[in-house]
Amino acid sequence: MDAFAPKTKEEQEKEERTYQPYTEIMSTLPKVRGFAPQHLYNHQGFWYTESNLPRVMAVQNHFIAHSSDILLATNPKCGTTWLKSLIFAICNRKLHPSTQHPLLTVNSHQLVPFLELLYTNNEIPDLDILPSPRLLATHIPYSSLPQSVLDSGCPLVYMCRNPKDTFVSWWHFLNKISNKELKPSTLEEAFEMFCNGASIVGPFWDHVLDYWRASLDRPQCVMFLKYEEMQAETIVHVKRLAKFVRCPFSLEEEKEGVVDEIIRLCSYENLSRLEVNKTGEAMFGENEIKFHTFFRKGKVGDSSNYLTAEMTERLDRISEQKFHGYGLTLN
Ligand code: A3P
């Protein structure tokens, strides 16, 4: 099924007119040079790239969620690729034998697309024709999600990660995808911007807090996961995750090793060695990104190899200040 079936000239013109006001609104928004390929624009308290913001506005105005949808949300570099793989494998486990699993030949970003990237080239896709349950991912902060997502009551899974490893992962990622327009930045430059909140969908801490508070207010709809806890006790959290997205493992499945098999399939070691993830690539908006850039080390605590003691202290201090009183720690 093609959500981007050919459109008539009139339909195309209508869609272009739909996007026109977004560009006009953007010209009035605060703008900074950010930790990103392009300038960042502030919309509803969060920073977006010039190319992504119109898409986010289109999602806000046009996406209609279904109660059967499953939505994953992350801050970039917090384990999106892993979470997408796990949820795809959990939800589709009855359809695919492990020897011919789609994850062995297709990257999880193609199996679970980013919602905002579906609103591309000034188009409004017909997402109603996608098979149910629709598995979609987003970086949009909770408070900026379309109202229909909140009204639908669909399960929303958020994964976060400690800011030190997130920042270091981001810096490596952006430098790897650097090109003529995106100049590599030094660690120090990037660090200043990250601390000041000027990262994509930053401030990082506000994004995390937005979903944390939502998970406390609406625990039946919003699940909050930490990358570090997923690494430490994968089996416990994968079972919780399956239950939350309404695909719980039966006792027979557990006995037969289905949970372990999914964990192994989606592990960093397995996915990063697959040909598709070593040599494949795809368009993410207007950027062609090689899949191997989503797999670097997959380790907790690797930031200590890059950050000075002062940098670590500064990030810890911001976390303490921002999360104070909310019962949340990310170390
Ligand atoms: P590092 O750069 O610290 O290695 P995202 O998917 O949100 O872009 O996050 C990328 C980070 O998740 C990278 O972290 C990457 O190595 C790690 N990652 C990718 N696949 C993973 C997996 N299957 N299990 C654990 N971590 C994974």
Image (cartoon, rainbow, N blue to C red):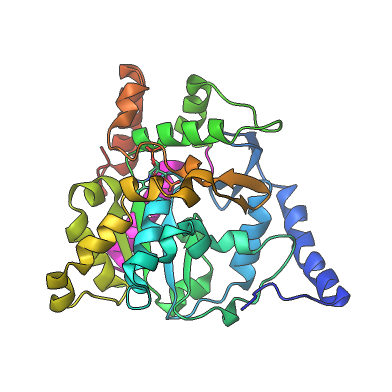
Can you give x and y, in whole percent of width and height, for residue 214 in the image? 35, 62
Which residue reaches farthest right?
Answer: 9
User: How many labels, in total?
Assistant: 0
Q: Residue at x 48, y 61 (%)?
A: 137
Which residue reaches farthest front?
Answer: 99
Quadrant of the snapshot with the C terminus: top left
Q: Nearer the viewer, residue 149 or 123?
A: 123
Q: Residue at x 40, y 75 (%)?
A: 154
Q: Is residue 28 above or below residue 167?
A: below
Taking the image as shown, residue 15 lies to the left or right of residue 293, namely right
Can you give x and y, in whole percent of width and height, for residue 111 in the image? 49, 64
Q: Is residue 218 above or below residue 168?
A: below
Can you give x and y, in whole percent of width and height, for residue 200 in the image? 54, 43
User: Magenta region: which residues?
Assistant: 199-219
Taking the image as shown, residue 116 lies to the left or right of residue 91, namely right
Q: Nearer the viewer, residue 97 or 86?
A: 97
Q: Magenta segment: does it hold 204?
A: yes
Quadrant field for ligand 1:
top left
Res 103 → quadrant = bottom left
Q: Is residue 22 above or below residue 203?
A: below
Q: Magenta segment: does it hold 41?
A: no
Q: Main secondary structure of the magenta part?
A: helix
Q: Residue at x 35, y 33 (%)?
A: 164
